[in-house]
Amino acid sequence: MRGIVACAVSVAAIPSDIFSNQTVRREKRGDVPAEGSADEIVVQFQSNHFSQLPESKSQREAKNRVLLHILPYMALSTPYIDLHTHRHRQDPEVRSVIALSMEQTLFHPEFPRFCSAGRHPWHAATPWTEEQGGMLEDALLREECIAVGEIGLDRVKGPDLGLQRSVLIEQLDLAAARDVPVILHCVRAHADLLQLRKMRGDTNPWIIHGFTGHGELAEQLLRMGFMLSFGEALLSTGAKVREALTHVPTDRMFFETDEGSTAIQVIYRTAADVLGVSQSRLRSIMQENFIRSFGVEA
Ligand SMILES: [Zn+2]
């Protein structure tokens, strides 16, 4: 950064110990958009609004210089997103979407920072009632509750598929009406879900969690607008799911721990190796996917 006047910037998203000896610099005042402090620029960038700022050529060049400086620090501070888990882990590096059962939504005095709520297909033996709908609606009124899930279909375990289906549809209706994503449990029922999505024409994100299928199935689901979340299955070498991962555009994937004991960091590391991208890049992409799908920053 030859001949550039230093201009120290305090950026909330950057750990201060990393930032103390580093400075984001700019050539002269006014090179960056006048209405944005560096703090705001980072926020705008993270919220994908940065590109909407009016730009002249010199502003654009200045913006690129600022971004090149701050991106490595932003990546360091970007959390790992665990899209679906039932465990409450205390890890400052991780943001988890904790799956709550309908009963848990009633008895949780405080919701986790991010959670989903719904009736699992294994518990679909009793019919869905108006009261259940009210409980789910109440849960979704809380800002922490960002998705309906886990809900879905299971052809191996659980009650009759017809019962599962009717409970699922009630919850899909609610998610569609509120335009929130759904997190789906699916065991040997991908054809059913593909048909449902096609028939209903819903446009809210449908994310299949714990995907373990092959590449061809992944592509079929992607064509119908599904997103796929990958977990511990990625760790087995030679697994077909590793190959499937390479069929999925990075803007359509998530990662998760579900009920497993593997740290999400290990799953990211494996996925980054399979995809041939850096872990920090993968974290940034997942953050973008999260913002795009859930409308909040992790
Ligand atoms: Zn689960």
Image (cartoon, rainbow, N blue to C red):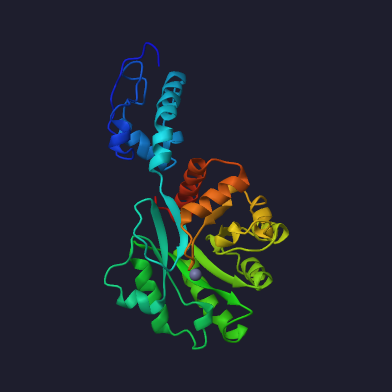
Q: Residue furthest top?
A: 3
The answer to whether residue 134 is seen in the rendering is no
Name the quadrant containing residue 185.
Answer: bottom right
- Rendered position, 35 above or below 128: above
- Residue at the image point whose x is 36% and y is 55% from the top: 91
Specify whether residue 264 is in view. Answer: yes
Picture mark count? 0
Residue appearing at x 67%, y 63% in the figure: 213
Specify whether 253 is left or right of 49. Answer: right
Residue 177 % position (x, y): 47, 67
Residue 199 placement (x, y as % from top left): 64, 69
Identify which residue is drawn at 66% across, 73% down.
188
* Extreme residue in the bottom direction: 126
The residue sitting at 60% across, 87% down in the picture is 160
**Viewport quadrant of the N terminus:** top left
Using the image, determine if residue 190 lies above or below residue 283.
below
Q: Position of residue 98 (x, y in %)?
A: 41, 65
- On the rendered structure, is 158 left or right of 240? left
Residue at the limit of the structure toward the front, as seen here: 237
Q: Percent position (x, y) of residue 195?
A: 67, 70
Identify whether 181 is placed above or below 4. Answer: below
Query: From what the image shows, is residue 42 above or below residue 26?
Result: below
Q: Quadrant of residue 2?
A: top left
